[in-house]
């Protein structure tokens, strides 16, 4: 074979070898740099330490993403599921909320110790069919406590709230079986507990029952009076721009935590503050806002700040 042909053949073989080697190296580098796609799922976490028996509010929780293969079936993924529930144990900051560590609000209300207002005490007294107003007293009724000894009689406590009767902490419905109870549990201030215990040891206690219609009317009149007194003092909210603070904030249809959500917005979302505000039964102030999509709703003042701040 002529030297010229041998040279051309060697050159051609070298080019082919170089191309194949380059393709092999590129393929190896591409496979090395390619990472598998990890599916992520949003879960709800505590933004601060939450003690046991604490009601969950929007200010206490946020959301974060974790790999889907790390998600436990008990993990809470929707913030609306956690709101208004109560913790059954302590939860640490950053800890993921779990369904089995939450209690329904309805279940919470049935626990007497959680029905007692702060600073007050629960005291049970013995009653008979007569002194217990013929077994007509129900939880959440109000009674006066009358003490008598011989010819001496007098009202020692007025308008006392009933926490429970016998073992019942809720009213018996139309299908429930009525049971004659022998004790009534009352909510009292600490000083009044001493008064009623002393009186019970020195004589007989009789309960007198308030009319619920009278209590409702009295409460409505009191509310109307307070509204009239504060009407001139209520601050007017000037329309302006506010920004959300938590990672996820819920905008609701009406100014309370039990209202249905209309939108969940992320941190630093701008909202137009309208000229209405309301206060719920827990003292939380709600602001009426308008979203970028021109949806109107309500958001807690605790989770927003002015854009200028």
Image (spheres, helix red, strand yellow):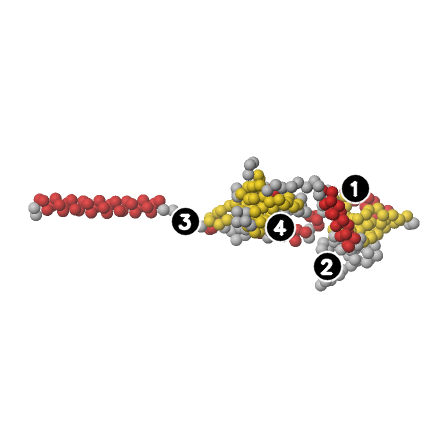
Q: Residue furthest left?
A: 2
Where, quadrant-wise, is the C terminus in this rendering? top right
Dot 2 falls on a residue whose secondary structure is loop
Q: Residues within 10 Å of mark 3 (few under 14, many from 20)?
A: few
Mark sitting on residue 191: 1
Q: Nearer the viewer, residue 258 or 108?
A: 258
User: Between tags 4 and 2, which lies in front?
Assistant: 4
Determine the residue positioned at 56% across, 51% down: 262
Q: Are marks 2 and 3 in contact (CB under 8 Å)?
A: no
Q: Nearer the viewer, residue 152 or 47?
A: 47
Q: Residue furthest top?
A: 309
Give the percent coordinates (x, y) of residue 222: 76, 47
Q: CA distance from mark 3 to mark 4?
A: 41 Å
User: Between tags 1 and 3, which lies in front?
Assistant: 3
Name the residue beneath numbered marker 3: 37
Q: Residues within 10 Å of mark 1 (few under 14, many from 20)?
A: few
Q: CA distance from mark 4 to mark 1?
A: 40 Å
Q: Give whichever of discs 2 and 3 has the lower sequence position.
A: 3
Q: Give whichever of discs 1 and 2 has the lower sequence position.
A: 2
Q: Nearer the viewer, residue 2 or 306?
A: 306
Determine the residue positioned at 51% across, 45% down: 64
User: Between tags 4 and 1, which lies in front?
Assistant: 4
Q: Give whichever of discs 4 and 2 has the lower sequence position.
A: 2
Mark sitting on residue 172: 2
Determine the residue positioned at 76% across, 55% down: 138
Q: Are marks 4 and 2 in contact (CB under 8 Å)?
A: no
Q: Nearer the viewer, residue 243 or 64?
A: 243
């Amino acid at each position: 074979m002529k030297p010229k042909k041998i040279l051309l053949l060697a050159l051609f073989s070298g080019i082919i070898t170089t191309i194949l080697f380059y393709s092999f190296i590129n393929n190896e580098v591409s496979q090395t740099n390619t990472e598998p796609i990890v599916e992520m799922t949003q879960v709800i976490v505590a933004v601060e330490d939450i003690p046991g028996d604490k009601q969950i509010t929007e200010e206490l929780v946020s959301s974060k993403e974790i790999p889907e293969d790390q998600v436990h079936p008990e993990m809470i993924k929707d913030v609306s599921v956690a709101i208004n529930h109560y913790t059954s144990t302590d939860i640490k900051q950053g800890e993921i909320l779990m369904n089995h560590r939450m209690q329904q609000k309805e279940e919470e209300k049935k626990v007497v110790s959680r029905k007692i207002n702060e600073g007050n005490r629960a005291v049970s007294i013995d009653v008979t069919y007569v002194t217990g107003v013929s077994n007509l007293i129900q939880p959440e009724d109000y009674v006066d406590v009358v003490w008598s000894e011989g010819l001496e009689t007098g009202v020692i406590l007025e308008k006392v709230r009933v926490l429970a009767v016998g073992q019942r902490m809720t009213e018996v419905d139309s299908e429930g079986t009525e049971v004659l109870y022998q004790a009534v549990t009352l909510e009292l201030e600490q000083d009044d507990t001493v008064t009623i215990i002393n009186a019970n040891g020195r004589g007989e206690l009789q309960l007198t029952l308030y009319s619920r219609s009278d209590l409702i009317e009295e409460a409505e009149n009191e509310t109307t009076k307070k509204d009239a007194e504060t009407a001139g003092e209520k601050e007017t909210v000037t329309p302006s721009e506010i920004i959300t603070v938590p990672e996820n904030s819920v905008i609701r249809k009406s100014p309370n935590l039990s209202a249905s959500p209309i939108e969940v917005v992320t941190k630093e979302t701008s909202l137009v503050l309208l000229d209405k505000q309301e206060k719920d039964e827990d003292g939380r102030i709600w602001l009426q806002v308008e979203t970028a999509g021109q949806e109107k709703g309500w958001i807690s003042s605790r989770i927003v700040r002015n854009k200028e701040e």
